[in-house]
Image (spheres, rainbow, N blue to C red):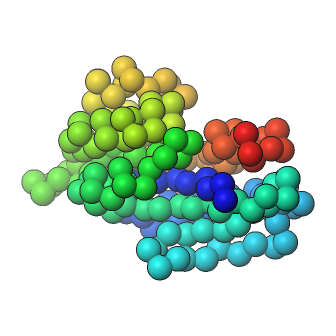
Amino acid sequence: MRRFMIHHLEDQPELMSWIPGSLLNWVLVDRPEWTDGADLVEDEEGNVCFRIAPNGDGCDVVYRVYESAELFQSRFPKTATAGDLVLLDVMVDSVEGGVRPHDPTVYECAIRAVGAAAVWVITAYRQGIPPQLTQQLSGHNILDKPVDVGTFIQRVARAFGWLNGDAAA
């Protein structure tokens, strides 16, 4: 069964909890033939999931949050596959106060697993993006907070091949 997976490193996941519901709403409105009124479910690992059936083939859509760089680096490489999408919140709270960028090994881990084109950085502080990361990503892969929901959902749909109506792409 095909799987569409979004891995998200976010130390404040409640701020981005709208993502899976918005994706499901897009499917229900724009591709109603892909679902029989699917619901969001949380699986035993804490992933938020729903099922779609484009072309009659069942596909799982999975949204997984990692609340720390340590969790991301230990768990993400074990489950990441080609075609997955990675969202990285660039900044993290510093123990000294304020915010700082994640260690570069976080970005390297993501890019090594899925390629730079599938890594999207989400930040309110573009100036905090490490220069080596900026060089590897296109401007298209850098999203400003607050994220525009409509634009974001369209970009995810395009990345997963959903805009042409063929989620098997």
Residue 79 in view, yes or no:
yes
Quadrant housing the C terminus: top right
Rendering coords of residue 98 (x, y %): 20, 51
Residue at (23%, 36%) from the top-left corner?
Answer: 104
23 to the left or right of 17: right
Rendering coords of residue 45 (x, y %): 44, 74
47 to the left or right of 68: right
Residue 15 in view, yes or no:
no
Q: Residue furthest front?
A: 1
Rendering coords of residue 127 (x, y %): 32, 30
Quadrant housing the N terminus: bottom right
Determine whether 158 is above or below 13 in the image.
Answer: above
Determine whether 97 is above or below 138 in the image.
Answer: below
Tell which of 129 and 35 is nearer to you: 35
Q: Give the image quarter of residue 34.
A: bottom right
Q: Give the image quarter of residue 90.
A: top left
Q: Which residue lies furthest to the left in this view?
A: 96
Q: Give the image quarter of residue 28.
A: bottom right
Residue at (64%, 39%) from the top-left corner?
Answer: 159
Residue at (23%, 39%) from the top-left corner?
Answer: 105
Rendering coords of residue 136 (x, y %): 39, 23
